[in-house]
Image (tube, rainbow, N blue to C red):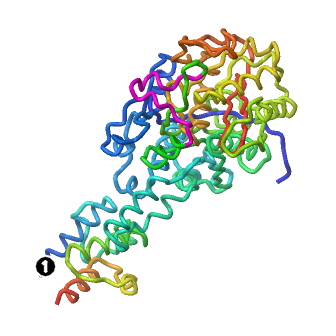
Amino acid sequence: MSPTNRTVVVTGIGATTPLGGDSASTWDGLIAGRSGISTLEQDWAAELPVRIAGQIAVEPTEVLPRPLARKLDRSAQFALIATREAWADAGFTARAGEDNSVDADRLGAVVASGIGGVTTLLNQYDVLKEQGVRRVSPHTVPMLMPNSPSANVGLEINARAGVHSLVSACASGAEAVGYAIEMIRSGRADVVVAGGTEAAIHPLPIVAFANMMAMSKHNDDPQGASRPYDKARDGFVLGEGAGVIVLESAEHAAKRGARVYCEAIGQGLSADSHHIAQPEPTGRGIAAALEQLLSFTDIKPAEIVHLNAHATSTPQGDVAEVKALRKVLGDDLDHVAISATKSMTGHLLGGAGGIETVSTVLALHRRLAPPTINLTDLDDEVEPGLVSPEARPLPEGPVVALNNSFGFGGHNVVLAFRTV
Amino acid sequence: MATQEEIVEGLANIVNEIAGIPVEDVELDKSFTDDLDVDSLSMVEVVVAAEEQFDVKIPDDDVKNLKTVGDAVDYILKAQA
């Protein structure tokens, strides 16, 4: 099929996060400024340098049938729960091909994870050492492979146009959404389920991140630990969960009379090529991604009214992002309501781009920007007014919102959405 | 040594745990793959659980011959002997 430039829209959303078991309860938590961070009470956490995390609000085993859950890594369980919500929210009542709503050959799935089935890998290694060769689960490989969430989502909805798993650390979920937009725009698919998931709350990943000095050690104040833009920020707080959206060509959505949340305009991409884990301090790569977005689309800086920032609560990264935004947008940054929702959810790594896309879509749909909590003493390099401890209304008329995600390895992704 | 009835009951509980099939549906003439939603990967789990419960060895090469619950019961009865 020849390339096209079709308009892409969002017709469904789903999530399971530290704030709630679905997108509605997650949104309510975000708007209320509620923290989803808590103390890790598990025995294994007692001796760790970091003993706090954004743990899932509703355990997936309470939602999924047991025979299904036991064959899925926790990251795929989250992805499947978010997908089921988004699929139903988009108005689909059956798998593709089982009714006339969507052709399986025109349906794709792109649900990313930054780390994949790390808890399956580590738990099965424990089984091997403690219980022997025979007890290692035959499901281990399909559970731990990083494409498992996407593959299981594809099986769930019967996606045959392509199932993809982009991996770019904490930018994975956003990169998945961007790739999905382009699948539809290019004519490869009419409908794509896209997003991100992560389940890495386990002693090894926690210690590994902590030893990079990337994580907050505010163990005595879990709810105050994730504090983007605040002077006392000392690293990110690990979260878990998934966020998924249903993307669809505007034509396909109109034909079946689907409810449309917003337009998915496109993405800007770049790479820092600076350091494997450190952010480039001037925000050069972030600026390049945003400039690319503006040059590849019809977005005018004057239209941009909301940004779901990457803002993980690290000393360097939060400021580099704001510098890049100011450099590209100039005075137009002054009318952008920036939200650092990681202050409430923690950092879901590859899941972040998924749940923050859901938040961005809902912010446009409800015309309300979520608050940023724990702003006690704002960093001198972040102008007052850009961020707020209160939810802020967004203006009427056609407006644009952005969602930033960046990842270890220097990956920069900016996604753009517009009201309809 | 488990009797035929005890083996069927044991396998029914194992299949219920792994595939979620009601225990009363696990009958001698049922095919693991076609009737009980036990795919080739889950069959390995069924075999390992059965080996432990009935204290027998079921080599990988023999697993492919265990098409039905009856096949597995007969195999376990002989292996116990």
Q: Where is residue B80 in the image (x, y as percent from the top left)?
A: 18, 86
Q: How many labels does the image show?
A: 1
Give the labeled residue for mark 1.
B2
Foreground residue among A390 and A397? A390
Disc 1 sits on a residue from what chain? B
Instruction: Look at the image and tell me in which quarter the N terminus of chain A lies.
Output: bottom right
Q: Where is residue B27 in the image (x, y as percent from the top left)?
A: 24, 72
Instruction: Look at the image and tell me in which quarter the C terminus of chain A lies.
Output: top right
Foreground residue among A78 and A284? A284
Residue drawn where x is 59% and y is 12% of the image: A388
Question: Is A200 drawn above or below residue B41 in the view shown?
Answer: above
Foreground residue among A68 and A288? A288
Residue drawn where x is 26% and y is 66% of the image: B14
Question: Is A412 drawn above or below residue A125 in the view shown?
Answer: above
> Which stretch appears magenta?
A212-228
Judged by its main secondary structure, the magenta piece is loop
Q: Position of residue A85 (x, y in %)?
A: 49, 38
Residue drawn where x is 61% and y is 53% of the image: A159
Dot 1: what SS? loop
Residue A204 visible in the displayed image: yes
Instruction: Judge the density around disc 1: few (<14), some (14-19), many (≥20) Cα neighbours within 10 Å.
Output: some
**What residue type is disc 1 on?**
Ala
